[in-house]
Structure formats: C-alpha cells, structure tokens
C-alpha cells in the first residue's frame, strides 16, 4: 500500500528521510524504535487512518522487545478480521506496542496527500497514542495548509518551515547535471544559465508561495 | 536511501533548537509533535524527485 520512493530530493520528504536516519543513528540499535509511513495521493482511498496505523504497528511488532501478547493480539485480530482491522483496534494495539518500548518515534510523511477525513482520523489517533504514551515523539511533514488541521489536535506543535536555500538548489542541479546522459545537448553556457537562473526563480517562488492564501496553495 | 541523498542538503533542520528539543523531549508532551512544511512551489512542482525512508524503517508494502 505504501510505496517506497527513491531519488534525489530537496523536499519535505527528504527532510523526513534525514530525520529518520538521524534518529536511527542516535539510537544505535538501542532502546529507541522508529516507525515511518509515507502518504501518497495516488492511493488516497486506501490510505485510511487504520491502514497507516497498521503500517506503524507492523514495524513496531517486528521488534524483539515487543511483548508476545501484543503480537498475539495482532495475529488474532488479523485472523478474525483480515486486513480490515478497525481503527480503534489498530490504535489500541499500537498503544500496547508503544508501551513496551522506552521511546518510540512515529514519522509520517506528506500528510497533505491524505484525504481530509483520513487525515483527521489519523491525527486523532496520534493524539490518542500520545496521551497514553507521552514519551512518544511524532514527526510529520506536509504542505503548509495542513498546519491548520495539525494545530487543532496539537495546539503546541513545533512548526518549522522548510525551504531549500539557493546553494542547496544549486547543489541539487549540479548533481542532476552530472547524471545527464545527453551530454552532447549541453554547453558550458547552458549549464551556467541553468545553475544561475533556476535557483533564482525557485527562491522567488518560495517567497511568493509563502505569501499566497492557503486555498491557492492547495491548487498549485 | 541516504546514499541517494545529497550531503548537507536539509541538514540544517537537524541542528536547530526546535529539532533538538523535540528529540530530547525536554519540553514535555506539549512539544511532542514536530511538523515540517514545505512550499508546494518548490517541492511538488519543480524539484520533487521521489524519496523515502530507509530500508530499516520497514515501510509496509502489503496493499
């Protein structure tokens, strides 16, 4: 259901990957569990809160530290209800799994690609888990308009804007140009123009996009 | 995944006080959620190549 995605990126998804890597590095295989999921608008109908919770749960129960009764409850529920576990059941099992671990990080990327009804259920579920296990840390990414929904559930959420600087865009372009297989079509002048103009234009777009009302951002 | 990512791009977030405090949990449950948002003008329209979490995160693909 959730696809792995690959390639170079400057986006919030890249940030999400960075964060997960950092959390893993710091954990060093110790007492920290990191579970992640990626939302994809092409699978919106299937990406219900229950399915996303299921993805989180599967990653958590794969750990040896998880108590057998959590695994057994997972197996039993799957056997009885198939793949269509109810959201409350899924959330309860995630709570059990989280409670067996010293610390859990839940990372969900591209929340804006969830259908609104699924997003609200997902945020409600995360809040539920957090209330029961306050040591849990939740990292989410998305387009700016999702902030409205997030603060409904997490009024004091830490909110950080991400936009690549010109040097990052330039480095990205340099890397892409290195991988260009049509070298004959490239000249020094064209390469210089690409590295000069695109970072300028995109930096301008960042500023403009940040000042556009939310409904317009959704349409972009 | 990390081998496909550009070094130092995006790393600044990891060095911020916001990330450090969120990671350590020193501000308690009220600050348990970190939301990073990106402009659609950058990420979605022009520069978005796909990426994802590392293999060891075990994203589910059973659907």
Image (cartoon, rainbow, N blue to C red):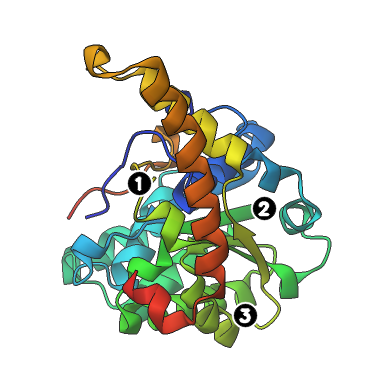
**Chain-order first, disc 3 or disc 2:** 2
Horizontally, residue A180 falls left or right of residue B3, namely: left
Question: What is the chain identity of the residue bearing mark 3?
Answer: A
**Label 1 crowd bin: few (<14), some (14–19), many (20+), radius 10 Å:** many
Q: Secondary structure at mark 3?
A: loop
Q: Position of residue B14 (x, y in %)?
A: 69, 44
Question: What is the chain identity of the residue bearing mark 2?
Answer: A
Q: Which mark is residue B59?
A: 1
In this view of the protein, can residue A101 be seen by the observer?
Answer: no
* Residue at screen point 27% across, 13% down: A183
Which residue is more in the foreground, A129 or B16? B16
Q: Position of residue A149 (x, y in %)?
A: 50, 83
* Front of the two marks 3 and 1: 3
On screen, B62 above or below A95?
A: above
* Front of the two marks 1 and 2: 1
Q: Are marks 1 and 2 on the same chain?
A: no
* Residue at screen point 40% across, 34% down: A8
Q: Secondary structure at mark 1?
A: loop
On screen, B57 above or below A194?
A: below
Disc 3 versus disc 1: distance between alpha carbons? 25 Å
> Is the C terminus of chain A in the top left, top right, bottom left or bottom right quadrant?
bottom left
Q: Are marks 3 and 2 on the same chain?
A: yes
Q: Secondary structure at mark 2?
A: loop
Q: Which mark is residue A102?
A: 2
**Label 3 crowd bin: few (<14), some (14–19), many (20+), radius 10 Å:** many
Count of numbered circles on the image: 3
């Amino acid at each position: 259901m959730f696809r792995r995605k690959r390639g170079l990126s400057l986006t919030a998804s890249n940030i999400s990957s960075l964060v997960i890597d950092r959390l893993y590095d710091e954990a060093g295989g110790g007492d920290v569990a990191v579970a992640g999921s990626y939302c994809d608008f092409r699978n919106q109908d299937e990406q219900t809160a229950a399915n996303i919770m299921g993805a989180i749960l599967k990653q958590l129960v794969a750990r040896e530290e998880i108590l057998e009764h959590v695994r057994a409850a997972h197996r039993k529920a799957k056997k009885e209800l198939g793949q269509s576990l109810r959201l409350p059941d899924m959330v309860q099992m995630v709570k059990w799994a989280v409670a067996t671990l010293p610390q859990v990080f839940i990372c969900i990327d591209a929340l804006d690609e969830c259908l609104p009804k699924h997003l609200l259920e997902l945020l409600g579920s995360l809040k539920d888990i957090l209330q029961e296990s306050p040591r849990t840390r939740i990292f989410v990414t998305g387009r700016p308009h999702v902030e409205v929904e997030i603060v409904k559930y997490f009024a004091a959420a830490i909110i950080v804007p991400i936009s690549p600087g010109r040097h990052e865009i330039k480095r990205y372009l340099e890397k892409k140009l290195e991988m260009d297989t049509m070298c004959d079509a490239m000249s020094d002048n064209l390469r210089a123009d690409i590295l000069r103009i695109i970072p300028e234009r995109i930096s301008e777009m960042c500023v403009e996009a940040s000042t556009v009302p939310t409904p317009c951002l959704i349409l972009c | 995944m990390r081998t496909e990512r550009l070094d130092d791009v995006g790393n600044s977030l990891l060095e911020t006080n916001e990330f450090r405090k969120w990671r350590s949990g020193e501000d308690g449950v009220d600050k348990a959620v970190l939301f990073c948002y990106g402009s659609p003008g950058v990420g979605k329209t022009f520069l978005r190549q796909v990426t994802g979490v590392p293999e060891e995160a075990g994203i589910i693909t059973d659907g």
